[in-house]
């Protein structure tokens, strides 16, 4: 049951697999203990993580989750060290059971993409044999105070489960929050392909740019194809315009159906929300030729 035979490769090149009937779905990478070091080592490969994705209650109150369970978990050496301290109630024992790991979604080919904002941070409190496979464990982690992520992210991640999304605008049916999450998933699965050369023309499908989150989804796909990333806030967009995110300036952006954005991206009470005019000025400043159609 070898896990990750490609351990010498960069994270995005590695493949995370096992021979159990239920395939691995999540990879946890981070560190253990309370020291000042911030390692980024594999902690566990898991079939499921219970409590990571929970929708807020209808009353709008925060849905705080006291614990997370790593189901069908194959511990890597760092987590095995934390499990070895179970039952130790001393300060040193509690410190050894502390973990903090970022969550990566594992695709069917074994590749893993970071899920932005998905973090398991707390104290390992229990472990029992898992019914999901011989040698696997169900590990309970008592969480630090942290709101879970909405379950809608799971639907978004399914579009990357067997590779990249196959068509554009799959994000269009989501509301603003999940459009923002879509761009975050796109960032976690960012392509390593080289930038298009300066002078390239890109077509932005503006039919669904009814909010700024839709703009980030649309420009990501204009530059990098379905599921592409090219920023998910203004600072990130600035970073992308400096190169290494799919396009080199100067380039031409043909914004189709720009009338949709002209209606929806307007000044309102939230002055932090950019308007169409602001975006055009910003892009033009970075030597982008904008063709509004």
Image: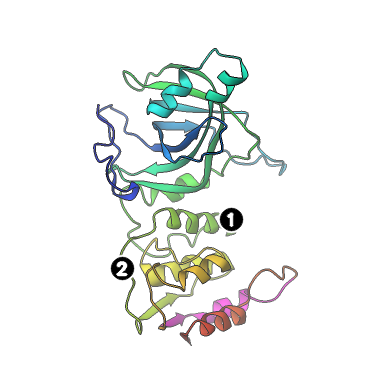
**CA neighbours of label 2 inside 10 A, class few (<14), some (14 to 19), many (20+):** few
* Residue 245: % across, % down: 40, 67
In the rendered image, the quadrant that contains the N terminus is top left
Residue to which mark 2 is pinned: 194
User: Does residue 261 show up magenta in the picture?
Assistant: yes
As rendered, which of 181 and 10 lies closer to the eye?
A: 10
Residue 173, image x, y percentages: 50, 59
Identity of the residue drawn at 61% across and 82% down: 277
Q: Which quadrant of the figure has residue 89?
A: top right
Query: Which mark is drawn over residue 221?
Result: none
Query: Which contiguous range is marked in magenta?
Result: 252-268
In front of the other: 96 or 189: 96
Q: Which residue is mark 1?
A: 177
Could you classify mark 1 by the number of other residues whose Cα lies within 10 Å: few (under 14), some (14-19), or many (20 or more)?
Answer: few
> Which residue shows up at 41% across the image and 23% down it?
80
Q: Is residue 16 above or below residue 84?
A: below
Left or right relative to 112: residue 291: right
């Amino acid at each position: 049951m070898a896990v990750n035979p490609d351990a010498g490769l960069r994270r995005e090149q590695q493949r995370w697999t096992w021979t159990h009937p239920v395939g691995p779905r999540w990879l946890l990478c981070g560190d253990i203990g309370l020291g000042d070091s911030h390692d980024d080592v594999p902690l566990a490969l898991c079939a499921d993580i219970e409590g990571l994705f929970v929708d807020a209650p209808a009353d709008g109150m925060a849905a705080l989750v006291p614990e997370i369970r790593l189901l069908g978990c194959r511990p890597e050496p760092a987590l095995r060290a934390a499990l070895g301290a179970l039952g130790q109630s001393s300060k040193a024992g509690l410190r050894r059971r502390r973990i903090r790991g970022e969550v990566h979604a594992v695709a069917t080919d074994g590749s893993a993409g970071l899920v932005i904002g998905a973090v398991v941070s707390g104290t390992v409190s229990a472990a029992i044999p898992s019914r999901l496979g011989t040698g696997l464990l169900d590990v309970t982690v008592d969480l630090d105070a942290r709101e879970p992520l909405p379950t809608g992210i799971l639907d978004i991640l399914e579009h990357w489960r067997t590779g990249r999304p196959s068509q554009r605008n799959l994000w269009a049916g989501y509301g603003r929050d999940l459009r923002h999450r879509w761009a975050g998933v796109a960032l976690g699965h960012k392509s390593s392909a080289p930038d298009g050369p300066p002078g390239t023309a890109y077509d932005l499908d503006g039919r669904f740019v009814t909010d700024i989150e839709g703009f980030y989804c649309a420009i990501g796909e204009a530059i990098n194809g379905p599921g592409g990333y090219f920023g998910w806030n203004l600072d990130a967009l600035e970073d992308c315009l400096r190169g290494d995110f799919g396009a080199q300036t100067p380039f031409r952006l043909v914004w189709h159906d720009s009338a949709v954005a002209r209606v929806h991206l307007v000044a309102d009470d939230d002055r932090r929300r950019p308007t169409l005019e602001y975006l055009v000025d910003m892009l033009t400043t970075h030597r982008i030729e904008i063709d509004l159609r």
